[in-house]
Image (tube, rainbow, N blue to C red):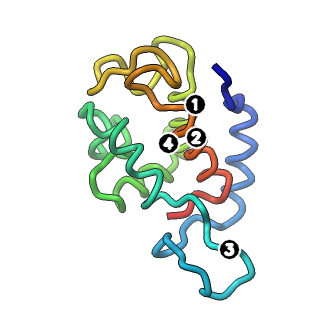
Amino acid sequence: MKRSVCGVLGCLAVVASLACSGEDIEAGGTGSGGSGGSSAAPSVTFTKDIHPILQAKCGTSGCHDMPNLFMPGHGAADVNVAYTEATSMGSLGMPIYTRILARISSTMPGSIMPPTYATPPCEGALGAPGCVTQEEFDLIQEWVDQGHLK
């Protein structure tokens, strides 16, 4: 299976450049054009594209459905909570979305997300039954690359 996974250093470089860009949130996120500015509306937004993936893959196991002291709530049903959690800084000093990309693309059994006890269980790695698909991974990566807009 072909994988378009960036290495940890590659992801960190992307994160560093995005973190300094100042393009964290675009209110409304759906953009229908004509809102001024010279760039077109983003093709991938958190609300429309990413939240449904995170809610289905991360919010159903009972681990990431709400923020708590131990785990981020990027799979929360509330899109605003999920967005805040996905774009917040994690304990390793990186945005949570960087960790999400690393964990869903991992090939190490103890690091793969969603875990085997999730509903539905992830039966391997990226693209396996119950796991994040290559298309979903690519969509999340595109969202990050274009400035992780809401």
The picture places residue 51, in percent across and down from the top left corner, at 41, 52
Please name the residue shown 34% across and 17% down the image.
116
The kind of residue tagged 3 is: Ala
137 relative position to 70: left or right: right
The kind of residue tagged 2 is: Thr
**Nearer mark to the viewer, of 2 and 4:** 2
Which of the marked residues, 3 or 1, is nearer the chain's N terminus? 3
Q: Nearer the viewer, residue 107 or 69?
A: 107
**Nearer mark to the viewer, of 3 and 1:** 3
The picture places residue 47, in percent across and down from the top left corner, at 43, 61
Please name the residue shown 71% across and 60% down the image.
20
Looking at the picture, does residue 40 appear above or below residue 100?
below
Q: Which residue was labeled with disc 1?
A: 102
Q: Are marks 2 and 1 in contact (CB under 8 Å)?
A: yes
The kind of residue tagged 4 is: Gly
Q: Which residue was labeled with disc 3?
A: 40
**Nearer mark to the viewer, of 4 and 3:** 3
- Count residues near mark 4 (Cα–Cα under 10 Å), then give few for <14, some for 14-19, many for 20+: some
Whole-number angstrom distance, CA of label 4 to CA of label 1: 13 Å
The kind of residue tagged 1 is: Ala
Whole-number angstrom distance, CA of label 2 to CA of label 3: 25 Å
Whole-number angstrom distance, CA of label 4 to CA of label 3: 31 Å
Please name the residue shown 50% across and 70% down the image.
29
Indicate which disc residue 98 carries. Answer: 2
Q: Which residue was labeled with disc 4?
A: 90
Whole-number angstrom distance, CA of label 3 to CA of label 1: 29 Å
**Nearer mark to the viewer, of 4 and 1:** 1
Whole-number angstrom distance, CA of label 2 to CA of label 1: 6 Å
Mark 4: which secondary structure?
loop
